[in-house]
Amino acid sequence: MSALRILADGNIPAVAEYFAHLGSVLTTEGRTLSAAELAEVDVLLVRSVTRVDEALLRDSPVRFVGTATAGVDHIDIAWLEGRGIGFAAAPGANANSVVEYVLAAIAAVDDSLERLLAGGRVGIVGYGHVGSLLARRLRTLGIASLHRDPWLGPASLAAPASLDEILACEVISLHPSLITDQPWPSRHLLGPEALATLGRQQLLINASRGPVLANDVLLARLRQPNPPRCVLDVWEFEPAVPPPLLQSVQYGTPHIAGYSHDAKLAATRMLAQALEGYLGLAAAGVAQVAQAPALELPPALTGVDLLRQLCTLRYDLAADDRRLREAVLGAPEPEARVAFDQLRREYPLRRELTGSRVRVINREQVPLVEAMGAVVEWV
């Protein structure tokens, strides 16, 4: 096999470690990638900011495309198949990262966590890799959830519910793929009537795709009396973030819910394995990942205070919110767009709590530590 020419979005980590044995590896800016850059490229690796279609690839020698994301709405898969171009995505790679983001949001907003532990419920829309993992994690924490995914059907759900039942939950967390086709489009999933049913004691989280909620419709509801609390990681027209909407949500972040270092490495590994399979090669192994330092818990923490601490040990939601507000509020829109992408490109290294070592001396802390997927290390 001749050496491949591989071009990758610079935000995909460890590309050289996973792909160098297959050929030369170069990186580029994903959002501004042009057809001219692909004149001598065999393999293209992208993230969600790059639209991959006939306009980009028509005159290129690219024969394999990989996206280091679970969502594929930025890829014209039918066109790739028609041209015989291999394709792979990374479904599930960032699922745990997004789940930990959602739990951090719940822990950060008012008394949402307390109300859930007292018998409240989380309504989950979309029961794919993220939604189903969130449901399992909540169950281990003793928190009830209801699930809606008409794209799968009730038989596939642990606790199927109508949209009205979902909207009556204390927390509503949106995790559908972006679907525009009937009969169940997820684009603009919650319209004015649905949002009108939500009140101040409820929390709405969107960490799926921006167009699942319409910017103008959501902003109008948040400006009305008794609005729900809202946490947004995604925005309808990103990298444009409307300052009025950002100012109206409890927390806003620049599409980084799935941006843990562990999730990114998992996605890179999945794409490398897919390319090796496409080429009929044996897997070359995995890159070495440094183990994160062990975490410490104050020994007196128990109950809801302990759970809130665990939700924030690895992830600082407020810091991401602060960085986005500093970049967007008061800046001209062109500069704000550039800053949004820069926040993603220069995102601080973040590890997941799942699999992390947590040192404890208080036996009462063990069940919650283990429920969160961490590994107990006795002091």
Image (tube, rainbow, N blue to C red):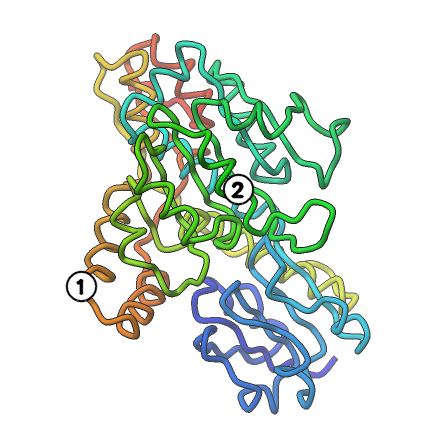
Relative to 68, is 378 above or below?
above
**Residue 190 shows which numbered tag?**
2
Q: Are marks 1 and 2 in contact (CB under 8 Å)?
A: no
Q: Amino acid at mark 2?
A: Leu
| Amino acid type, label 1 | Gly
Tell me residue 254's x, y (percent).
Answer: 36, 55
Q: Residue at x 45, y 10 (%)?
A: 119
Place of residue 178 in the rendered image (x, y in percent of width and height, measured from the top left): 60, 53
> SS class of the residue under badge 2?
loop
Give the crowd class for mark 2: few <14, some 14-19, many >=20 residues within 10 Å. Answer: some
Q: Residue at x 33, y 69 (%)?
A: 337
Res. 330 mark: 1
Query: Where, quadrant-wise, is the C terminus in this rendering?
Result: top left
Tally the marks. Answer: 2
Residue occupying image coordinates x 30% and y 24%: 308
Q: Report helix, strand or loop for mark 1.
A: loop
